[in-house]
Amino acid sequence: MDLFDDLPEPTQTSGPVSAAQPKSTKEEEEEEEEHKEEEDKRLKRKREDAECHADKNDKKEEEEREEIKKVCKEGLPVLKGFVAARRGEREEMQDAHVLLPDMSVCLSTLPGHVSRVSYFAVFDGHGGARASRFAAENLHLNMAKKFPSGEKENSDKLIKKCLLDTFRQTDEDFLKKASSQKPAWKDGSTATCVLVVDDLVYVANLGDSRAVLCRMEATAGADEQRRSVTLALSKEHNPTIYEERMRIQRAGGTVRDGRVLGVLEVSRSIGDGQYKRCGVISTPDLRRIQLTANDRFIILACDGLFKVFSADEAVKFVLNVLQEGSVEQKPGLTEEEMRFDAACQQLASEAVRRGCADNVTVILLSIGL
């Protein structure tokens, strides 16, 4: 039998004892209530101690993460954006652009493994300026809402999904607004967006605006000179490309004179509601590249530039300006920044001088350590 099981209550004791008065039900309830209050206080103190300890640990971990981010950020390539825009011979400026070197101001929280997020974009409008302006105002905000906060292992996959969802959402939002107008807006826009996450560059583009990277490589020989290599970071979307034309024709559209229905020059865009049923889509082409110590700059520009410059010519033009002896002095800029600003301005002006009648917008991103 268990030693503590069913022990009998004592009936009498030997020797003199003081007579114990039986407790009333009320006294028992009060005693039980006091015991319960003391137990609650003890548990509360225990919880507070645990929460305090957890808060200290969380704070310590947060400080460690911020310190790691600070160290990582100091080792990242430094990006600075310069922009030049020319109306050309058009009556209206239908291009739009965004320079957001620190996109973390738009994010609710920066992922733990990320030290920097930057965003730069060029939008080339057609049929009006409303689609390009809408995209410039809203695309990065939609991206911020959808930006992944998960672990590093899945970041590439999550960023790809974020970009695809962002373009779809921006297009749907504009089409909804455009169709509600009287008369309905018929504007459309290309988009070339550069999203930089630490040292990884993600490029998402629609239409014929482009992004190119200048990378310096050592040449063979004893003089150790370096030559520039031009890397395409985007893919053009026009109806003359086989895959694009096939999609348009499968959707019931036609391509005449290199244009959708003989009118629209691009096969992917934001807006252009009247052409969406003909196979024009808003799904961007996505590319990714890791920045290196040999990378010098990125050019983002609308087709106004590339109608009169090849990508390689544009890169060499910028390099020549960067190597010139004197540049216009501008307050608040370092000599290096003045050279990049001059290169950007001169590149856009040269496009107009060469006879480009279209709007010209150029963003030049310098890459330094």
Image (spheres, rainbow, N blue to C red):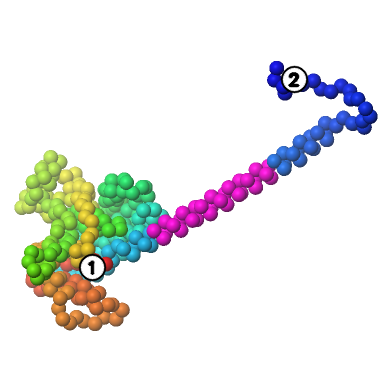
Is 41 included in the stretch rendered in magenta? yes
Circle 1 sits in a helix, a strand or a loop, which is it?
Answer: strand
Residue 315 appears left or right of 143 = left
Q: What residue type is disc 2 on?
A: Asp
Of residues 14 and 275, the one nearer the viewer is 14
**Mark 2 or mark 1: which is in front?**
2
Please name whichever residue, 226 or 184, is drawn nearer the observer in this view of the structure: 226
Residue 40: tell me if it is visible.
Answer: yes
Q: Is residue 314 visible?
A: no
Magenta residue span: 40-68
Is residue 37 found left or right of 73 in the rendered image?
A: right
Q: Position of residue 288 (x, y in %)?
A: 22, 53
Residue 369 in the image, given as x and y percentages of width and height:
26, 67
Q: Residue furthest left?
A: 257
Q: Quick one: quadrant of the N terminus?
A: top right
Residue type at mark 1 is Ser
Kindly report the distance in space between the C-alpha atoms of the residues bearing marks 2 and 1. Answer: 86 Å
User: Which dot marks residue 6?
Assistant: 2
> Which element type, helix, strand or loop, lies under badge 2?
loop
Q: Residue at x 33, y 49 (%)?
A: 152
Q: Residue at x 92, y 32 (%)?
A: 18
* Majority secondary structure in the magenta region: helix
| Residue at which label 1 appears | 366
Q: Image check: 23 left or right of 6?
A: right
Residue closest to the far front: 15
The residue located at (21%, 55%) in the rendering is 289
Q: Is residue 326 shown in magenta?
A: no
Callouts 2 and 1 close, C-beta under 8 Å: no
Indicate which disc, 2 or 1, sits on the residue closer to the N terminus.
2
